[in-house]
Image (spheres, coloured by chain):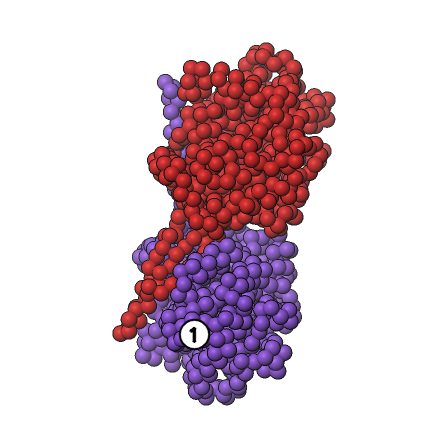
Chain colours: A purple, B red
């Protein structure tokens, strides 16, 4: 391990970011609301949005450069915006061998830098990303299809929050042992035994981040910053349809590292040619010791099965479920659910898929409602929310890829079952070429095997199921079984009955899913806030880890002790 | 999850053990010497040793009962003491199905009990074990072959220390989040969003402890107590030759659990018939979510490869290495090494195996010493230490099993190379039937392929290699490669040169092994102290985890969040 780099900028950054780090360390223990990154677009200056757009436009149609990263001269391109724009950006391409060699040779200095310097550099990277949130919003919007407002918040400050949260956890876990301790053991009448003991954090090795199409920054930053803050170089393998947000991230990280005297190849981009299956090749390299992945269950399972040399953190598919028993705010419930189903066209890993509604009806402040009434009212709530095309486009964003579009077509054709609400084609006023669809709501019966086969599989995108169940008890039981067998990132329930609430909580604890109860206002089941909410539990098949807890970071490094007589 | 059990003893135990738990929580952050369990045999009363012997004798030749544990009526026996006594104890036997069903049905109450109650009960179990340390010493001695003094300390208070350490880590990690937090997010001029969030620890499932022959309690307690304290029922599968120490542990745990109103089947014993391969069958059961294992690399690798449904914590074989460059206390160094090689006949996973000595000689306070002189002086130091049979027996203990004996025979026959010190048959004055051998010291040359093949494989037991190397630099390089390729639980070095010390530290950090420097007194490379030293690093092939750090406990549970509007 090389001697610690002593570039003066390192000390300056440690000082500059100390207060934010300390505040973050407090936040992760208190779990109240906190963020250092404003979520209001206007907080970024009068001209922030226009400047970000200009910066984004300047990236289009050109090679994207990463000074100093190895390249084989065969650039990768092909990103197309779900809003109908060709991005025309090409990224440097390198072979796995060249990338891994570059990352390996960058390791020693970063390993020796220690937790405080690494945290400070990560915070500087995040601060620079934050300052460019409007540019990131454009990049996220035009790769994921998120509407601008969401791309700005979820792809910008909220993603940065999750990155900072990971840095805070990483710093906390790396500093639980003192750097040095003196040990004095009494020996009766003889002199005591005395030793000095030094504890040094030793990073694992190369970390591989495998990005996803829908939330390249929000789902990417926890793993990226957890690995980097614990001393591991990070190879960022973006989803081929969502390269730009992570390419910008990599470039900013490299700039900060280089300015502070570190090898910028500590963070490299592994853009890939169509169908190159680079993730598969990289994931089993012996040098790769950490993998963070968000995506399909099939590839997540493959990673867990095959990347045996690495610690693998996966977030996969799930079937998110809502139990509707009763409510004292029927309108609020309908509005909340309508927004949850519509936001980003249901393309969140946290979007509710199955709404379990007792056949016996739902007791509400507006009187008892039958299954059919609840379904009709929910369909009407969604229709109302999305009646205006401009507003609809701002909520729905665009359909991210042909696979999702295909499912809306199937839903529209009745392939999943009878429609309570048919998907509608929306014309985005700003992007007429965008593919925008309102959600489909499918009626299903929990006791019909064909229906079960449909709704008990993840149907990613704007398709939800209003599932008639025998009773609330049956709904709670189905929630439990769904989470256990299919996994879930979220669960929710509506009830005014203490016994039902207790049964829902028991089922959630038992099956290992976090539960949102009686959401009727401006908090949605699909949203979790860094520093307060855990994202996922790691306790059901949808994910083997959570953002963010000690388990997410504590095994990204090991501790080596050196002891001597005093 | 059932409601928390409210037996009055639980509150009493929480209060009784609070101070010890608090002190342990401080100790794991300070890393100075601390233990609540006296290591001096006399601290346990005038008649402690005799009472322990009597209690042990009363166990011999009889069925060992575990009230309430399922049994198939086909008891398991066959333990024989390395000191030549047939123990004649039979243990209840159960099928995997029956054991797992019993553990599963015990889960809910323990999961609901929460971290504080679980820690208190674990501390009560440890306190009762501690009070019976002399009885445990007999049980450990007559299953492992450890001499009484070591069986008392390592099998008693030091093992209890490691158990308590795991409980402290488990408690700390489970309580990092508040049980409940209020969250208030400002909304500009509108009312803030307000939520209450509850965080509940959710245990993983059944934990399987696979015990080892040589240190059933010391290597067993970290995993056992880490799993139990995090809410998981524990199935204890002892090594067939070392059942009694863990059977006693299980019985005491069951007593405490039952007294406090919990299902005693939270801790069960899986004694097995000869050759039943029960560990293999249990390890892949879907209900088993945690596995702790100490033993051969082959089975450790098998577990990591096959028990995919579980978190697997393994400690396997390694090749512990010492670099001898120079010393300012030649006698102290020789005495320290002689004791390290002799203690428990080298049957510790931490015993140095390879002593790397430059061909160019070693600079010492007694003048420069050639390779041959160092080897001869070390052999003489071992001979001197073990010259008297009674003293030798007290240091060496007995050979634990036929496999180890076979290696001493091979060493004596020159199969590993030229002998610098031949093993000697020692007659134990107290146990004439015991198999006791002094260590063999084999001369080897780092540049000869045959020699390398011999010393670069773990040779568990009283066989060490004095390896001639080209230079100190070559020795450091060989240390690094040995740790990386073969793994190691310990490394040590002797040098007075700052550059050499720096190179040793760099190699240790690089290869991921803890390093003891210039040990010349009463601290030995093979010994680690709980609350201060880490045992293993998890950073090289010898082990994938360490006693004890956050990573050892943080993934034995998950956290489920329930949130509601305030």
Above/below status of A484 relative to B109: below
* Viewer can see residue A196: yes
Above/below status of A292 relative to A468: above
Residue A92 appears at what percent x and percent y?
A: 56, 70
Q: What residue is at 60 percent from the left and 63 percent from the top?
A: A297
Say how many tags the image has: 1
Q: What residue is at 42 percent from the left and 25 percent from the top?
A: B38
Above/below status of A70 relative to B394: below
Q: What residue is at 43 percent from the left and 87 percent from the top?
A: A388
Residue B75 appears at what percent x and percent y?
A: 66, 30
Residue B61 appears at what percent x and percent y?
A: 62, 20
Q: Nearer the viewer, residue A65 or A170?
A: A170
Determine which residue is flagged by label 1: A368
Q: Quadrant of the C terminus of chain B?
A: bottom left
Q: Nearer the viewer, residue B208 or A254?
A: B208
Q: Regarding mark 1 in the picture, which secondary structure is present there?
A: loop
Which chain does tag 1 point to? A
Within 10 Å of disc 1 (Cα), the crowding (few <14, some 14-19, many 20+) is some
* Viewer can see residue B417: no
């Amino acid at each position: 391990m090389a001697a610690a780099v002593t570039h003066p900028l390192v000390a300056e950054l440690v000082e500059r970011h100390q207060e934010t780090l300390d505040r973050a360390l407090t936040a992760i223990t208190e779990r109240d609301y906190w963020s250092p990154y404003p979520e209001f677009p206007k907080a970024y200056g009068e001209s922030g949005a226009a400047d970000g757009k200009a910066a984004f436009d300047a990236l289009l149609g050109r090679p994207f450069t990463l000074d100093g990263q190895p390249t084989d001269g065969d650039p990768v391109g092909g990103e197309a915006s779900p809003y109908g724009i060709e991005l025309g950006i090409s990224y440097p391409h390198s072979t796995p061998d060249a990338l891994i060699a570059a990352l390996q040779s960058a390791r020693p200095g970063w390993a020796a830098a220690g937790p405080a310097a690494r945290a400070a550099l990560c915070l500087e990277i995040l601060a620079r990303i934050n300052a460019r949130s409007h540019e990131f919003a454009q990049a996220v919007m035009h790769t994921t299809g998120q509407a601008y407002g969401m791309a700005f918040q979820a792809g910008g400050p909220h993603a940065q929050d999750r990155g900072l949260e990971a840095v805070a956890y990483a710093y906390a876990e790396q500093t639980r042992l003192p750097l040095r301790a003196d040990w004095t053991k009494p020996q009766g009448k003889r002199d005591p035994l005395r030793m000095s003991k030094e504890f040094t954090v030793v990073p694992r090795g190369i970390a591989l981040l495998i990005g996803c199409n829908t939330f390249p920054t929000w789902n990417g930053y926890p793993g990226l910053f957890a690995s980097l803050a614990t001393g591991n170089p990070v190879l960022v393998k973006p989803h081929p349809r969502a390269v730009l947000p992570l390419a910008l991230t990599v470039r900013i990280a490299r700039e900060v590292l280089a300015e502070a005297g570190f090898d910028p190849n500590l963070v490299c981009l592994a853009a890939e040619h169509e169908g190159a299956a680079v993730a598969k090749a990289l994931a089993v390299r012996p040098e790769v010791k950490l993998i963070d992945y968000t995506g399909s269950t099939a590839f997540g399972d493959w990673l867990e099965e095959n990347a045996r040399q690495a610690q693998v953190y996966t977030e996969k598919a799930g079937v998110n479920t809502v139990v509707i028993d009763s409510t004292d705010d029927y309108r609020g419930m309908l509005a909340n659910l309508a927004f949850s189903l519509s936001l980003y066209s249901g393309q969140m890993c946290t979007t509710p898929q199955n709404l379990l509604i007792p056949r016996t009806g739902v007791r509400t402040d507006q009187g008892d409602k039958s299954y059919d009434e609840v379904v009709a009212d929910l369909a009407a709530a969604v229709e109302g929310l999305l009646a205006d095309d401009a507003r609809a486009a701002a909520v729905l964003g665009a359909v991210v890829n042909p696979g999702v579009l295909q499912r809306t077509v199937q839903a529209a054709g009745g392939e999943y079952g009878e429609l309570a609400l048919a998907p509608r084609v929306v014309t985005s006023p700003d992007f007429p070429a965008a593919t925008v669809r309102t959600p489909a709501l499918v009626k299903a019966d929990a006791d019909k095997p064909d229906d079960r086969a449909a709704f008990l599989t993840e149907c990613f995108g704007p398709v939800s199921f209003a599932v008639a169940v025998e009773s609330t008890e049956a709904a709670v039981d189905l929630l439990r079984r769904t989470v256990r067998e299919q996994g879930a990132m979220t669960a929710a329930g509506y009830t005014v009955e203490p016994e039902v609430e207790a049964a829902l909580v028991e089922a959630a604890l038992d099956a290992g899913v976090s539960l949102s109860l009686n959401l009727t206002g401006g908090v949605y089941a699909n949203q979790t806030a860094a520093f307060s909410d855990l994202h996922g539990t790691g306790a059901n098949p949808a994910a083997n880890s959570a953002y963010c807890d000690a388990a997410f970071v504590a095994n990204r490094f090991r501790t080596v002790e050196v002891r001597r007589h005093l």
